Image (cartoon, helix red, strand yellow):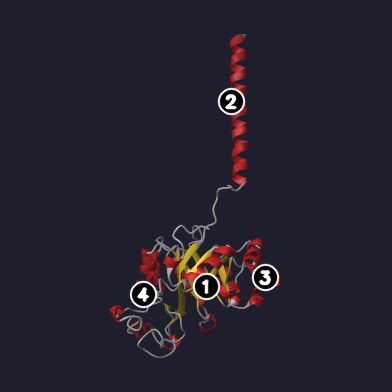
Amino acid sequence: MIKKMSKFLLSTALITGLFTSVLSSQANATQPSTQEKYRVETIAHRGASGYAPENTMSAFRKAEEMKADYFELDVQMSKDGHLVVIHDTTVNRTTNGTGNVKDLTLTELRQLDAGSKFNPTFAGEKIPTFDEVLEEFRGKIGILIELKAPELYPGIEEKVAQALKKHNMHKPKNEKIIVQSFNFESMKKFHQLLPEVPVGVLTSDPNHLSDAKIKEFATYANYVNPNLKIVNKQVVENIHAHGMKVQSWTVRSRSAVQPLLDAKVDGIITDYPDYVPRNKSN
């Protein structure tokens, strides 16, 4: 009898302990750690464009070397329908050529020097293709993809979606692929094409940060990415309250960093990744 009672008490203790442990684990899972620190992500603007020619493989490699969380790039389309990485809708500013990106074939674009204007040591740098970038950096660093002037390139959303699928990057882990644009209709379309890829809306217009507009963005976007001049803590809190994150642009001086940290933005887009504190917490 004593043995049976001992076994019963032992079993009861074990069950009670297990139940208590499960409840404790569930409570911890739902309650954020008080020691959890605010962390901001560093996004290298057009690659580490303060140190290498913007939107080139050299700039993207520099961003990876500098341990940025992401690099940002701009996608457009050549005359013959290839996705290429360049910011301006003309090649005039960053290359030794002239003309609209959309009026030049891929072969013509690839013949241009995209490095010398930044510094002669980068002579011969090419305009990359989107495929080339995805192939080299998949899984190595996050990529923030801007569709540049998509209204000039009918079907560019589908082409970008196809490229991400081709490289098995259409179901990103930890939001390491984000697609953004100033063209809100383009982002609605892209969200429909690849709903698992986070979408961001870019703006420098404070009217786009009204309650009504933020509610509208929340129906399809994961990020609202405003110019740093219109960012403050209240704006960030309002965007966060609607379940979205904030990546602000473009930091080109060290003094511009702290106000963004004070506002608790989620990401800082910068030409100089080393301007964001290495510990990335405030």
Give the camera-side residue of 192 and 70.
70
Residue 216, numbered label: 3
Distance CA(mark 1)–CA(mark 3):
22 Å
Q: Earlier in the sequence, mark 3 or mark 2?
A: 2
Residue 14, numbered label: 2
Q: Which amino acid lies under the numbered mark 3 shown in the image of this protein? A: Glu
Q: Which residue is mark 1?
A: 249
Give the camera-side residue of 109 and 16.
16
Give me the residue at 55% from left, 48% from top.
Answer: 35
Q: Which amino acid lies under the numbered mark 4 shown in the image of this protein? A: Ala
- Residue 194, image x, y percentages: 54, 66
- Element at badge 3? helix
Residue 52, numbered label: 4
Distance CA(mark 1)–CA(mark 4):
18 Å
Near mark 4 (Cα within 10 A), the count class, few <14, some 14-19 or many ≥20, is many
- Residue 220, image x, y percentages: 62, 67
